Image: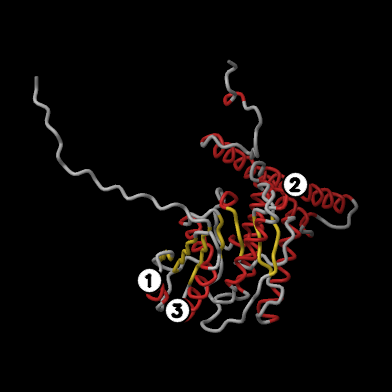
Amino acid sequence: MPELVRDLRPLPSLVPTPPSPDLSVVIPLFNEAENVRPLLKELFDVLDGLAGKSTEVICVDDGSRDRTFAELTDFATNEPRLRVIRFRRNFGQTAAMSAGIEASRGAVIVPMDGDLQNDPADIPRLLATLEGNGDDSTKFDVVSGWRRDRKDKEFGRKLPSQIANKLISRISGVRLHDYGCSLKAYRRDVLADVKLYGEMHRFIPIYASWQGARVTEQVVNHRARRAGVSKYGLGRTGKVVLDLLVVKFLASFTTKPIYVFGGFGLASMLFSFMAFFAAVGLKLTGVRDFVSTPLPLLGVMFMLAGMTSVLMGLLAELMVRTYYESQGKRPYLVAEEVNRPEVLRPQS
């Protein structure tokens, strides 16, 4: 018999995976070196008061050019609950928040700003509202902060924000007073399939509500900025409006893009026929010749635009079907199913 050779190499040591925490706080930061230490000290004091809840804090340095990352790493040496992610360059608040959410492990995720204008003392109140009275009928999936007494410039930020909030609520059908407040509380499952781009982090409650989540809001404290420079301005308003159009399109026409492109195309072709018949009518009555009116040119332009739009709609329909069928996706969401055949127990 061949001699058995025993492998005497030591087995690799297995490090047990730490249990997932109950709460993850996600903080995007960009050039906030002066605010890092006071913010984290105040935040961890609040988290220490959450009896029976394990916590973690994930700070995402969005390509800061000051000492933000150095302050974070220095604080993390004495606080194992603090995790730090650093971007190579500035990608924006939405990307930083998305990275923090993807890295988080908590059952509940609370994003907040890193400029000390959000009050960490509001976190217990958000969690209490999330749980309701403890029974399923009063629990919520998303609690959005509402900065009712906002400490910002009236015309520089407050007025555009009020207009944007009313516009977003009207278009989306999700009535919230303050979409721009970063301080919110989410159950992890409502963020499972949410992918964030542009400035879309503010629209997470809309995505969640469209998937059946229960959304509410909670009045939170808002403080004036003490240090650093605000990264927000009127330039964001246009980006938010464009992102809102994308959100509305994805919600209403993702599976039937022909309704948008085809509808516009049919309207354009209708205008084309109207312009053509108007030009013919003017010609027959002797009022104007074809060459003295722009109606024939408008008719041709509207016809070309309409036909192009219809063809784009047909191409979009092919792309949608390829997207769903190639990945085995379904254009619907199932909440639950009772007595599903493949999981029924065989009768004894």
Q: CA distance from mark 1 to mark 2?
A: 68 Å
Please give the label number shown on residue 78: 1
Q: Is residue 87 visible?
A: no
Report the residue marked by disc 3.
33
Would you identify the image quadrant in which residue 262 lies? top right
Q: Earlier in the sequence, mark 1 or mark 3?
A: 3
Residue 332 lies, in percent from the top left, at: 64, 39
Please state which amino acid type lies under the numbered disc 3.
Answer: Ala
Report the residue marked by disc 2.
269
Q: Earlier in the sequence, mark 1 or mark 2?
A: 1
Residue 192 lies, in percent from the top left, at: 55, 49
Q: Residue furthest top?
A: 348
Please state which amino acid type lies under the numbered disc 1.
Answer: Asn
**Label 2: element kind:** helix
Q: Is residue 46 above or below residue 265?
A: below
Please give the label number shown on residue 252: none
